[in-house]
Amino acid sequence: MSKLRIAILIVLVLAMLPITASTSAQDKVTIRITTWAGVEEAAELQAIIDEVNASQDAIEIVHEPKPSDYYTVLQTALAGNEAADLMWIDYGHLEWAFDGVYLDISDYIAADDRATADPDDYFPGIWDAGLVEGGTWGLPWIAQPLVLFYNKDIFDEMGVEYPNPDWTWDDFRAAAVAVTNEDHYGFTMQQGWPPPFLWVYSFGGELVSDDLTQAPIDSPEVIDAINFYASMIWNEELCPSEETIAEEGFEAMMRAGRVAMFIGGAADDYERSTEGTVGVSMLPKGATGENTTTAWVAYTAINADTEHPDEAYDAMVMLTEGIQNWKPSPRISHATVEHFVASIPYKADTAADIVAALPYMRSEYKVFPHVGDFMWGVWRNDFVYPVVRGEDTAEALAPDVRILLEDILAQNQ
Amino acid sequence: MGDPGAFNTYYPTLLRYIGLAIVLCLLIYGTYRGLRALGVKPEAATGFSLITPWIAGRIVLTAFPILLSFYLGFTEYNILWDKPKSLQDPLFHYKYALSLKVMKFDADERVSIAALGKLDAEGPRIARYRELDSFTIGDTNYVIGATDPFFFKAVWLTLRYAVFNVPLGLIAALCVALLLNQSVRGIGYWRTLYYLPAVLPAAATALLWWWLFAPKSGLINWGLGQVGIGPMGWFTDKNLVLPSFIIMSTWGVFGANTVILLAGLKNIPPELYEAAAIDGAGTWSKFRRITIPMLSPALFYNLIMGMIAALQLFTQQAFIPTDREDGWFLNWFIYNEAFNSGRMGYASAVGWLTSILIIAITLLVFRSSTAWVFYESSREGEGA
């Protein structure tokens, strides 16, 4: 028995040793951040983190990338009280603010005079979209608008004028048909991409009313938008079939020169390896007469259960400043060609067209409780997909789907 | 100590592991002392105390989650919340999952959601009936409405999968076992080859078949193309999702089933075949009257295990995306409700419904076993 006691004592003493060692080794507060960054992106982010860590003596940021199944991992970490102090989230996951996951940083923002924390320096459509449930739940570090990438070689070969901001969607469609032949397609779409709501907004429609009580998807604008969307997807007159996409890969077809036009995020790297053959244009004008585009926005949020909220906030601001000089920034003062090229040097040829699209950005949708059910469970699965697959018409489906969507809104009232 | 920040991040986990080891040691020691104090012999006390970590693990990691999920099925819960919320109607999730209604409709008119109405139950969401299917009796058309049609679709897909996959897997494994039971050259090589699928991870199998079923470059569509059959969208065409999964999974169950059946074949006394041959029995007669009855316990075991596994299909679907409308199996449906829709309470309830379904089917198969499973010991008992 005495041997067992001695053994336990030795283990306990050994376990305590690192505590003394670590506290003496550093006085900084450790702030953990979880991201979805893959290997290359994590290495680039680490360089920014290293700069932040070296720039001050109060905070040590530790990066914990979780590139696989990110949100499931994050959820389980939050449920187990193991989540990091800071976390990357995309716009849709602001919904978790209703579940008390994030720290409201409104007071911090009000008291902070750093430019990174100045709401007036962010594009209003981006900053305002993040004001959910009366709070501010994170700092946006990227807002990349959807733009039109095009392969110049294909347009030259077919003798068709390059896309330009004066195009309407009808011009776009006509050009896509004109550059399609047996070697390449004019455009490409798959279920869910480009997001169908892009055309809804461009055609002047809305998915949900401002007061979050109605879902006017049976409006002529929405019906026209979905019909336009459905008329192009997998239509081999201008787009590859579903089987061809599954075979060759959706994005891979653009990279391989099998597709003339592709709608993607401004940060997509099609220009990186194509040596000037890929151009960028704003999206065509819609019924509103504007080059409406949606932006994919991501935030750094603070875990509501962090033990160091002040340090976590400071770390978030410093890190966000660094990231905004690395990714397409959501800030107005960064909306210059010079800043964009400095952030992403290989986009020197296309930066002017991307920057021109920034003022037309709007958020993808409004965030409210169960917005995932609303957007993906019902709007996409029960409305867009059946129309796209030709199982029903938008006109016939819309009244029923509107009821389902408004049920979701009603349960939040 | 090169990176003190990183070290501090992982240090609490290290400490918890050490703490856990100490607690388990104390548990073993406490169990031993307790049993000895009760007069249990030292050898028995040592044995019991050494299995206490395993028992503790079972209680904490298996029994507790099972009981907790049962409780959660009567609550509204999102794993992001600190605790579940009580439901006004504790049975809401079960009602939401199981409610069906049948209604007449005019064939010339569309059945609107408004016409189908709502379920009269208070819960965290509006339980509105949606069209699940329709049928005609005589001149009258009926529509079946369900508050959660996707649950019923998942049940239906999973049941069809099990009904086709399990017998096919058994028949295929039996055929291979019979071949491997022959005395041919290189039999060890063949046995290894056929056992290989059993040792491959389900994820690797799924990805392998994903490639084989690829619309244009896949081997299967290439082969079909050679005989003039156009490319088929195996996982994208709603009519082909089920056959695709059945083919993929039948291959996956070959190995383990074959080994068990081969062992069963080896245990059949050769005297039985010799006696039958003397009586003039042919090959088919011997197979039907000796091989099948003598192998029936092994077939029964494979049937039970295969049925349970088939009703719990998950891994393959996690790697092969299919459409929710016609291609979600039950476990994938539950996973999505729990983690993507944030409805752990509902997912728990559906999990229990799935368990009840599996138990009911297993019991049915058990009850049927008296009619077709031959146990030598019970037959000997009858003789006595």
Image (spheres, coloured by chain):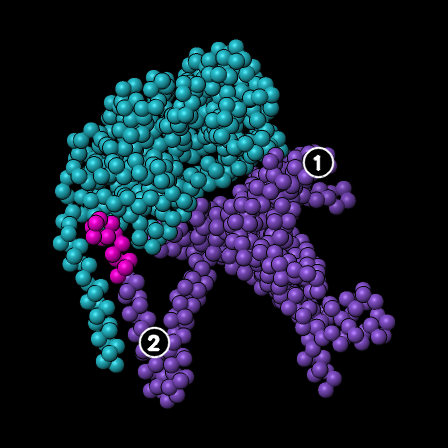
In this view, the residue in front, A57 or A122, is A57
Residue A255 in the image: above or below residue A109 = above
Picture colour for chain A: cyan
In this view, the residue in front, B187 or A41, is B187
At 52% across and 53% down in the image, what residue appears? B201
| B377 in magenta | no
Dot 1: few (<14), some (14–19), or many (≥20) neighbours within 10 Å? few
Q: Position of residue A77 (x, y in %)?
A: 34, 51
The numbered mark 1 sits on a residue in which chain?
Answer: B
Q: Nearer the viewer, mark 2 or mark 1?
A: 1
Question: Hey, which quadrant is residue B54 in on the image?
Answer: bottom left
Read off the magenta span: B1-15
At 50% across and 33% down in the image, what residue appears? A192
Residue B53 appears in the picture as rendered: yes
Q: Position of residue A136 (x, y in %)?
A: 27, 37
At 25% across and 36% down in the image, what residue appears? A48
Chain that is coloured purple in the picture: B
Instruction: Write down the residue under mark 2.
Output: B28
* Secondary element at tag 1: helix
Dominant secondary structure, magenta: helix
Residue A254 in the image: above or below residue B307 = above
- Which label is found at residue B226? 1
